[in-house]
Amino acid sequence: MTSAPRAADESTRDPDGEEPLPPFGEMVSQQLGGWRGLVESSIPILVFVVVNIVWDLNPALIASVGIALVIGGVRLAQKRPVRHAVNGLFGIALGALIAWRTGEARDFYLPGIIQSYIFAAALLVSAAVRQPLVGWGWSVIMAGGKSEWRQDRRLMRTFIWLTVLWAVVWILKVSAQAWLWYDKQDDLLGVARLVLGTPPYVLLALFTVAVVRRVTRDREPVVESA
């Protein structure tokens, strides 16, 4: 009668089998601010795209920054966490400032493009020096800060190639946006920003959790000696 719950509980334990790991849905929800956070992060960009199409650049900038401020204000009034709202507001404001100075709607997306290339480069460097960021992310999010995977050769190799995979996907998606930016396809760039924003992150996170849990479950307890 209790075998199924016990099996389910064991499948969500960390590599040491000490504490249950959070379900994947809960992990993604916490990192992205829940479904509300996903929606709220997309609204200012969607507003900018729509207003820029039907009106002009300056009204689009004002509307996108204004809606971002409203979202942050609502969260404060409801005494909800504002970290995601503040991060989103900073990105929106920076992009709006650059677009306002240059007069080019496409420059609204430039900070996000540059940030994504920097993130991809950091991933590749971390894999090259055997400090894979995906592994450290696993430690923080899924393993309660523990980093025993660094002494496990199989897990180390797994986190290195997963980190490279994240970098490659990030480079591909941001390069598509960079090409649209270079080609001055303002409206298509806005659509690409929405489509290539959260979905790739969620799919990569799903794949990462599945791979690491499978390796953790199937591996033999072979640990390098000091």
Image (cartoon, rainbow, N blue to C red):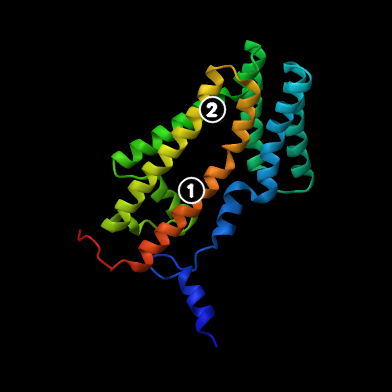
Three-letter code, disc 1: Leu
Mark 1 is surrounded, within 10 Å at the Cα level, by few (under 14), some (14 to 19) or many (20 or more) other residues, namely some
| Distance in Å between CA atoms under marks 1 and 2 | 19 Å
The quadrant of the rendering that contains the N terminus is bottom right
Q: Residue 56 location in percent, x, y?
A: 76, 17
Q: Residue furthest bottom?
A: 1
Q: Nearer the viewer, residue 114 or 203?
A: 203
Three-letter code, disc 2: Gln
Query: The residue tagged with tag 2: helix, strand or loop?
Result: helix
Q: Residue 30 location in percent, x, y?
A: 60, 52
Q: Is 96 situated above or below 81?
A: above
Left or right of 217 in this view: 205? right
Q: Earlier in the sequence, mark 1 or mark 2?
A: 2
Identified at 54% across, 48% down, the residue is 202
Query: The residue tagged with tag 1: helix, strand or loop?
Result: helix
User: Which residue position holds label 2?
Assistant: 177
Identified at 38% across, 44% down, the residue is 163
User: Which residue position holds label 1?
Assistant: 204
Q: Residue furthest top?
A: 102
Q: Residue furthest left?
A: 225
Identified at 39% across, 43% down, the residue is 165
Q: Quadrant of residue 112?
A: top right
Q: Is 202 situated above or below 126?
A: below
